[in-house]
Amino acid sequence: MSNEEDDRSGYEYLDAVPGLELVEYDPNDLALDDLQRSVQLLMPPYRGSHRPLGLVEVLPNLRMVQLLSAGVDEWRPRVPKHVMVASARGAHAGPVSEWVLSAILTQLRQWPALVRFQDQHTWAHRKFDADTLAGKRVLIVGAGSIGMAVARKLDAFGAEPTLVASSARNGVHGPDELPQLIPGHAVVVVTTPLTETTAGLVDARFLAAMDDGALLVNAGRGQVVDTDALVLELRSGRLRAALDVTDPEPLPPEHPMWDCAGAIVSPHAARTVPGTNRLCYRVAADQIATFLSGGTPSNVAYL
């Protein structure tokens, strides 16, 4: 367990897990005592979760890594195959899907332009082109807990979601159908995890297939989108974007994305609302309880 103060909300869920002994550590100081070297389960902090990666090499009895994030892309490739890596999938669905809907509405209803007019003390009636979400077709690339939560929220706004995942199932298209699905959607939402298959998925060809004036929303991982290709489309004015994740990340001050008129950028903060940490710990506690009882946690990732 990390002893970072910001990550303490929700510890009571871990305290309630039978057979679990909590040992706190400083993720900035990986010098361990003999007791800590005997640990079987490691939980990194949410913020800067990559910092304790070095512990993997000095914990000979490690059997499971429980993350507080929805993604496992930083950890799964670095952890031995015999060690389980589980995410907090499900805990982020509410706040992140809410961010996605707010980003879509912000762009469609032209709030960036309205705020700029307000800064200029300008009553800008009829000087901007607002649009409606009702009746729009929205392609969601990634049909996990976040993608499904986005789809439910879109239904409430009268939009028509189309879901795509790594494998087809009832109501969800498979990846082989994606190229044909891109045209005809006013909004494309990316919620897919970062894997070898999804890295660079939204490339120049993908973006070129999007309708003129379409909006790309990325709430997954920055590396899923080809940033240079997206900047070119934004500079041309053909597409718009709302990004909570970028590549590189953090986005450097001199990066051209900041100056693209059709883009809004948030600093990987879609899940950052009160209560999210507690949700993460509740999911983590359930995963750990299953592990300690001899079962396989539902959020274990195999990449």
Image (cartoon, rainbow, N blue to C red):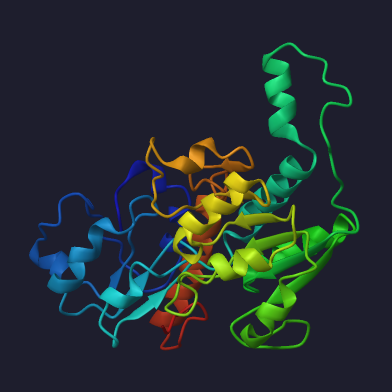
**Quadrant of the frame with the C terminus:** bottom left
In this view, 142 is above or below 207? below
What residue occupies the far top of the structure in this picture?
121
Measuring 85% from the left and 44% from the top, which residue is drawn there? 131
How many marks on residues? Answer: 0
Screen quadrant of the N terminus: bottom left
Figure check: 138 above or below 287: above
Q: Where is residue 106 drawn, in percent x and y? A: 73, 40
Q: Nearer the viewer, residue 78 or 189?
A: 189
Residue 3 in view in this figure: yes
Q: Looking at the rendering, which quadrant does residue 157 occupy?
A: bottom right
Residue found at the far front of this picture: 236
Measured as percent of width and height from the top left, residue 300 is found at 45, 80
- Relative to 105, does residue 134 appear above or below in the rendering? below
- 102 horizontally vs 293: left or right: right
Along the line of sight, the residue nearer the viewer: 191 or 139:
139
| Res. 146 visible in picture | no
- Residue shown at 78% from the left, 44% from the top: 108
> Residue 205 lies in what quarter of the image?
bottom right
Residue 231, position as x, y percentages in the image: 52, 50
Compare residues 67 and 282 and report the one nearer the observer: 67
Left or right of 254 on screen, residue 173: right
What residue is rendered at 53% in x and 45% in y? 272
Residue 164 in the image, given as x and y percentages of width and height: 68, 77
Which corner quadrant of the image does residue 121 belong to? top right
